[in-house]
Image (tube, helix red, strand yellow):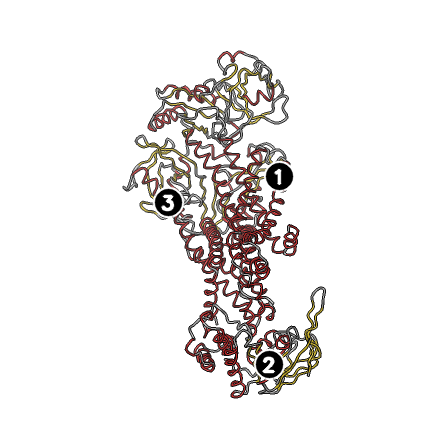
């Protein structure tokens, strides 16, 4: 499903070069639930961004669902992000001007679906995360756990084959974190969605099938 | 600190160049408006030198081809017209004049010992009675001048000061006889002033020559000025017109009170000023708008920096200063450039009509106005910035 | 999609009411100024009654006599027009008339000031005046120097109150005329038709004008079609060049020139101060357009600045949209749409405001007899200006926004 070969990522500023990732080789199969662990600055988020086409690797190749993704024009990258990938962020990143259902509909907007189709798909995704009763609320009226469930609904509404979660429980207390984890595991089991999750929490990581550890941008095993 | 602000300004020179241009343009326009207003006001406050109340101007058009204007037959008719006007009981005095007050025509001539040409006007013997001109030295034209072999002239006080200083001007020569001037022009009197071009115009040097109306006048047809009794109704205008029409059937006359001509002149001179003032207002609004844009960018771009400063204990006031400092520098650059340009106008003598002090008043007022605008624009974004909590800094990685 | 854009933009505009107000104010103000001036230009130059056939009319508005020591620039004299304007090829009609001169009338101790034009009979066929009563005077009236006059509505009101005027007599400039017709008021900035009183040329107090080559008159040539313009110009100028310069009674003149011009060409020449032969209407329009762009430049820059800030505030939103599949193009489209919505709002305000200003001008009588009213043409211009403004000030920030790296965008927080 996801295949990284000799991936390297260098950030350059005028004075210094920072090696964020180096020599990463990673194969993730369809339906796997993988955790990525490592201390701060070890390149976890960069790895996720590279897989999700938010960032381009400086060297090496990335295959997503059998497609090489480097060097694709912006329009095609956008299409792949839209159809293959769903993102979940630590700080939720809901758009505060839009209500719950409008937020969830965003990925569908870029698929040119009719508005009733978008509505029903978004409602189904919200039901899946148990928030069907809150569709008219605004993000600021929800608790952190609820906001993250909306964000998950947004990530799965387009039925992507890969979910990329960047510390999805990092801003939540442990009870809410458990809930979110339960949803993710359910998605992995029921829909066979491939999930890559960055986390600091060893207890959560142990629940996943495989743990990838990073240190200073390198894979350690 | 100041150096830091300058670095910021330099780093964003592309955006700032546009704002500098905005400030520069609006400053120049504002400067023009304020200088001109100050100029008009100082001119307005100085005495006019004559009384225009109850005086009517009779514009005379003979309908003659321009090559035959000023023939002696026309002058005879003109003299008759003055006599006809004087015959009415409503008329206190009447005179002929070359360039009427508040009118559009002016005449200039060269004078001995003066490099620039001097404004002059031609008038008959009755002009002081019509316009209430006061002589401060000597006398006005009269019949005794008929027999002289020199031409009498009357000068105003500023021309006297310029030519003769403290010496007695009476009997002195103003213009030597030459090819152009058959007769020598000799000063017989001094009037305080006669600002026939109107109150808003800068006072100027002037001399009068005598209109005799009994000879060929080679260049122009004089108009008539008529002083009527106070309270004379407009109905009299019709009778006066009928009298004039009867005496010169082929000619056309246009009677207008000087007061009305004065108002028309005010409108004519102040309307362009009003339009430029409107434009200046618009430009200022746009500058304010542009400054607000820059300020807001400052606040949004530097949220974390502001948050950090707050976390380190900076006061709301110092944050406000931090936000406003950049546009103050930008404004100052614009103003310095603008002043450098604006100062060229008096230095190069392009606007020599306007006194240097008036110019400086306009300049300083413009600078003050633009700085106040800058400070005012800082209020809302400054308030936004002061609301940035210390936590904002932490949100950033 | 568009509905979502609109919904989103309204929400964003509501978030920072202060800056929205400022933006709307600046846009509205700028567009009001532009729309109002466009309307004024339209009213001055566009064909409208009585000048309905302006597009196939040529005028001789200007003549130049030049020598080494003399130069006369003025409107043409009667003799010049009379000698050159008749029987030109491709013409339907010609008319010769004087400039509007100021004349006084006295009525029961009251003074009435008016503008008087002396015209030939054909004037009333070249111009399509709206006659409220009576009829124009004819070629015969002019030939026989009949003391007849056409007056406008204002003059009728001044002389006769609200009663009919045809058949009654008015006095003007010491002469008496019988009124044959009354026309609607024509604004002062329409040079050719404007006057308060029109009388036949030959009623003039003397006939000096008949021997003058310069000053006081205008001639209009109504061509059968615009296609005849070049031939008319060539023939007219050929006739002017055949005039014996000694006849001018102006010693030293070596060149005499006069050229039939369209109304806009004449306006270009007056405004730009270019010589007759070098006048180009396109140049005038380019100047108008250039001034408009200059005028819009400052607010555009400011609007761009504010828009960039609006975007920075929305960095996180941009990141999310990118992460969920918005391409650069989609984002640019979204932002430009938002900005166009803002400017259309401003444009609406501006259209209403300039409507008010023009109505105010008319009501206050700032310009005598002006009837400024917005028309479809002006609405179209206002819309075009607003759209141009919106796209212009939206594209740069939108492009900048779309280039924002999603990782950086997501890292940023909102204020």
Say if B245 sits above or below A81 in the image. above
Element carrying mark 1: helix
In the image: residue C7, left or right of residue C151: right
Observer-side mark, 3 or 1, equals 1
The x, y position of residue C122, in whole percent, is: 41, 45
> Which residue appears at 55% of the width and 32% of the height?
C249
Observer-side mark, 3 or 2, equals 2
Marks 3 & 2 on one chain: no
Q: Which mark is residue A202?
A: 2
On what subunit does the disc labeled 1 rest? B
> Which residue appears at 65% of the width and 73% of the height?
A41
Location of residue B10 by image quarter: bottom right
Circle 3 Cα neighbour tier, 10 Å, few/some/many (<14 / 14–19 / ≥20):
many
CB atoms of marks 3 and 1 within 8 Å: no
Distance, label 3 to label 2, CA atoms, is 91 Å
In this rendering, the count of numbered labels is 3
> Which residue appears at 65% of the width and 83% of the height?
A3
- Residue annotated with mark 3: C185
On what subunit does the disc labeled 3 rest? C
Q: Give the farthest residue toward the left.
A: C163
Element carrying mark 2: helix
The x, y position of residue C60, in whole percent, is: 51, 44
On what subunit does the disc labeled 2 rest? A
Depth check: C137 or B74 in front? B74
CB atoms of marks 1 and 2 within 8 Å: no
The x, y position of residue B7, in whole percent, is: 66, 54
- Residue annotated with mark 1: B343
């Amino acid at each position: 499903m996801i295949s990284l070969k000799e991936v390297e990522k260098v950030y350059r500023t005028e004075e210094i070069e920072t090696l964020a990732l180096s020599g990463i080789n990673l194969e993730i199969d369809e339906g796997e639930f993988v955790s990525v662990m490592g201390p701060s600055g070890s390149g976890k988020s960069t790895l996720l961004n590279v897989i999700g086409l938010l960032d381009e690797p400086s060297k090496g190749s990335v295959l997503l669902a059998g497609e090489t993704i480097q060097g694709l024009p912006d329009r095609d990258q956008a299409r792949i992000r839209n159809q293959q990938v769903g993102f979940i962020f630590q700080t939720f990143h809901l758009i505060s001007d839009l209500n719950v259902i409008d937020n969830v509909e965003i990925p569908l907007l870029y698929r040119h679906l009719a508005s009733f189709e978008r509505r029903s798909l978004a409602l189904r995704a919200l039901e899946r995360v148990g928030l069907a009763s809150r569709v008219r609320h605004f993000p600021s009226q929800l608790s952190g756990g609820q906001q993250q469930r909306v964000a998950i609904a947004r990530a799965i509404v387009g039925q992507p084959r890969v979910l990329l979660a960047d510390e999805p429980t990092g801003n939540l207390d442990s009870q809410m974190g458990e809930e979110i984890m339960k949803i993710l595991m359910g998605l992995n089991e029921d829909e066979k969605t491939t999930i890559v999750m960055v986390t600091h929490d060893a207890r959560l990581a142990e629940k996943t099938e495989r743990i990838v550890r990073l240190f200073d941008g390198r894979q350690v095993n | 600190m100041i150096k830091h602000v300058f670095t910021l300004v330099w780093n964003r020179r592309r955006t700032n160049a546009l704002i500098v241009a905005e400030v520069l343009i609006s400053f120049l326009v504002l400067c023009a408006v304020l200088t001109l207003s100050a100029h008009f006001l100082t001119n307005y406050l100085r005495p006019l030198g004559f009384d225009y109340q109850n005086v009517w101007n009779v514009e005379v058009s003979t309908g003659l081809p321009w090559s035959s204007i000023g023939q002696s037959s026309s002058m005879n008719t003109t003299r008759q017209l003055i006599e006809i006007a004087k015959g009415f009981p409503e008329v206190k005095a009447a005179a002929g004049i070359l360039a009427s007050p508040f009118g559009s025509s002016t005449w200039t001539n060269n004078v001995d010992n003066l490099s620039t040409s001097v404004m002059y006007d031609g008038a008959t013997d009755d002009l002081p009675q019509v316009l209430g001109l006061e002589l401060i030295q000597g006398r006005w034209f009269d019949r005794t001048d008929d027999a002289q072999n020199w031409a009498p002239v009357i000068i105003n006080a500023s021309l006297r000061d310029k030519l003769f200083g403290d010496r007695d001007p009476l009997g002195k020569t103003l213009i030597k006889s030459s090819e152009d001037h058959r007769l020598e022009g000799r000063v017989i009197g001094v009037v305080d002033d006669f600002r026939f071009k109107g109150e808003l115009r800068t006072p100027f040097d002037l001399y009068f020559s005598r209109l005799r109306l009994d000879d060929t006048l080679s260049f122009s047809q004089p108009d008539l000025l008529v002083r009527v009794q106070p309270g004379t109704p407009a109905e009299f205008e019709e009778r006066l017109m009928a009298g004039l029409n009867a005496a010169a059937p082929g000619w056309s006359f246009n009677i207008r009170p000087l007061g009305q001509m004065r108002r028309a002149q005010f409108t004519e001179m102040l309307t362009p000023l009003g339009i430029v003032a409107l434009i200046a207002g618009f430009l200022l609004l746009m500058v304010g708008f542009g400054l607000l844009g820059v300020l807001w960018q400052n606040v949004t771009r530097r949220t974390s920096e502001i948050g950090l400063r707050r976390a380190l204990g900076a006061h709301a006031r110092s944050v406000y200063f931090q936000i406003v400092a950049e546009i103050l520098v930008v404004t100052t650059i614009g103003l310095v450039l603008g002043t450098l340009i604006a100062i060229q106008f008096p230095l190069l003598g392009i606007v020599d009509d306007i006194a240097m002090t008036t110019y400086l008043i306009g300049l300083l007022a413009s600078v003050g106005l633009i700085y106040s605008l800058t400070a005012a624009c800082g209020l809302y974004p400054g308030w936004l910035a002061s609301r940035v909590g210390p936590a904002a800094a932490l949100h950033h990685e | 999609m568009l509905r979502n854009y609109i919904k989103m933009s309204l929400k964003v505009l509501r978030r920072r009411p202060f800056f929205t107000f400022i933006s709307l104010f600046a846009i509205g103000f700028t567009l009001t100024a532009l729309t109002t001036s466009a309307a004024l230009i339209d009213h001055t130059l566009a064909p409208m009654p009585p000048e309905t056939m302006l597009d196939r009319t040529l005028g001789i508005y200007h003549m130049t006599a030049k020598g080494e020591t003399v130069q006369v620039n003025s409107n043409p004299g009667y003799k010049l027009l009379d000698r050159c304007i008749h029987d030109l090829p491709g013409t339907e009609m010609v008319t010769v008339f004087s400039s509007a001169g100021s004349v006084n009338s006295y009525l029961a101790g009251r003074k009435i000031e008016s503008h008087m034009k002396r015209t030939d009979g054909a004037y009333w066929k070249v111009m399509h005046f709206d006659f409220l009563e009576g009829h124009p005077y004819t070629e015969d009236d002019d030939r026989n120097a009949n003391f007849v006059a056409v007056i406008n509505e204002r003059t009728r009101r001044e002389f006769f109150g609200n009663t009919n005027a045809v058949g009654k007599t008015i006095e003007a400039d010491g002469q008496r005329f019988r009124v044959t017709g009354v026309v609607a008021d024509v604004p002062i900035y329409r040079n050719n038709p404007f006057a308060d009183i029109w009388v036949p040329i030959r009623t003039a107090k003397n006939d000096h004008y008949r021997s003058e080559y310069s000053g006081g008159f205008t001639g209009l040539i109504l061509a059968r079609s615009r296609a005849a313009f070049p031939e008319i110009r060539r023939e007219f100028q050929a006739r002017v060049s055949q005039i014996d310069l000694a006849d001018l009674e102006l010693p030293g003149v070596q060149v005499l020139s006069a050229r039939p011009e369209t109304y806009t060409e004449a306006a270009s020449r007056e405004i730009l101060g270019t010589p007759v032969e070098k006048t180009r209407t396109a140049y005038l329009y380019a100047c108008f357009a250039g001034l408009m762009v200059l005028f819009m430049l400052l607010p555009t820059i400011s609007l761009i600045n504010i828009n960039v800030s609006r975007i920075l505030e929305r960095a996180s939103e941009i990141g999310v949209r990118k992460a969920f599949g918005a391409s650069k193009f989609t984002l640019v489209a979204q932002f430009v749409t938002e900005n166009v919505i803002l400017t259309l709002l401003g444009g609406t305000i501006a259209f209403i405001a300039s409507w008010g200003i023009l109505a105010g001008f008319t009501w206050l009588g700032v310009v005598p007899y002006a009837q400024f009213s917005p028309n479809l043409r002006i609405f179209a211009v206002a819309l075009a200006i607003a759209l141009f403004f919106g796209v212009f000030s939206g594209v740069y920030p939108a492009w900048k926004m779309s280039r924002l790296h999603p990782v950086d965008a997501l890292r940023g927080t909102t204020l």
